[in-house]
Image: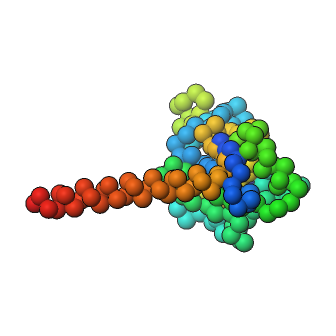
Amino acid sequence: MEKRTQEIRLTEMRAVQNDENKMKIEGYAVVFDSPSHPIYGEWIEYVDKNAFNGCDMKDVVLRYNHKDSYPIMARTKNNSLQLIIDDKGLKIEAELIDTASNRDLYKSIQEGLVDKMSFRFSVSKNDWDYSTTPTTRRILSFDKIFDVSVVDEPAYEATEVYARSKEEAQEEKRKYEEQKLEFEKEKLKLKLSI
């Protein structure tokens, strides 16, 4: 069976200056069970939450609009790009190196001019439903992810990318720790009442 490379665009992103003066961005290149815009005007695509099981993501690059002519922004191979599969989808975290092109794109993300993502991939298993109009394709298993890209026009509106400040990250961690502490207190109360 021939595997074709495809790209799907979807996400949202934003950028915020952080105290470390590093250009960090986060976002979702894939959101599970979220419909794409009609692909080539012929079908709508969904990504199954198990589609990344066994997928080759060893050397994935972060690009702008999937362009080979644009310098690579980050890469999994050198750990400047992290790919995290969670309940929502495929999350990306990247620290951009200090280049003129990255500074320009980072500013565009901060200003909300560029706020979506996409990914380029090959599929090993999918399911087609021709009884729907347009046809529906559910991607059940990816073979390989080639790149994740910050894009101007996504195929999936649910995707996102943003730059996060150090304060925002610390606040999220603080809230998480508070919720965890409350949960532990409730567990202890239940134990003592038994």
Front in this rendered view, residue 182 or 133: 182
Front in this rendered view, residue 173 or 162: 173
Residue plotted at (70% across, 47% down): 15
Q: Which colour style is shown?
A: rainbow
Front in this rendered view, residue 74 or 96: 96
Residue plotted at (39% across, 55% down): 178
Quarter where residue 128 is shown: top right
Task: Return the residue found at the far top.
Answer: 133
In the displayed structure, 188 sits above or below 171; it is: below
Quarter where residue 135 is shown: top right
Front in this rendered view, residue 35 or 43: 35
**Residue 102, horizontal then vertical, whole percent:** 82, 55
**Residue 149, horizontal then vertical, whole percent:** 73, 51
Residue plotted at (57% across, 60% down): 84
**Residue 101, horizontal then vertical, whole percent:** 87, 54
Q: Quadrant of the N terminus?
A: bottom right
Is residue 17 visible to us here? Answer: yes
Task: Return the residue found at the far bottom.
Answer: 78
Is residue 62 visible to us here? Answer: no
**Residue 38, horizontal then vertical, whole percent:** 66, 33
Q: Is residue 170 left or right of residue 103?
A: left
In the displayed structure, 98 sits above or below 33; it is: below
Residue plotted at (71% across, 71% down): 77
In the displayed structure, 9 sits above or below 193; it is: above
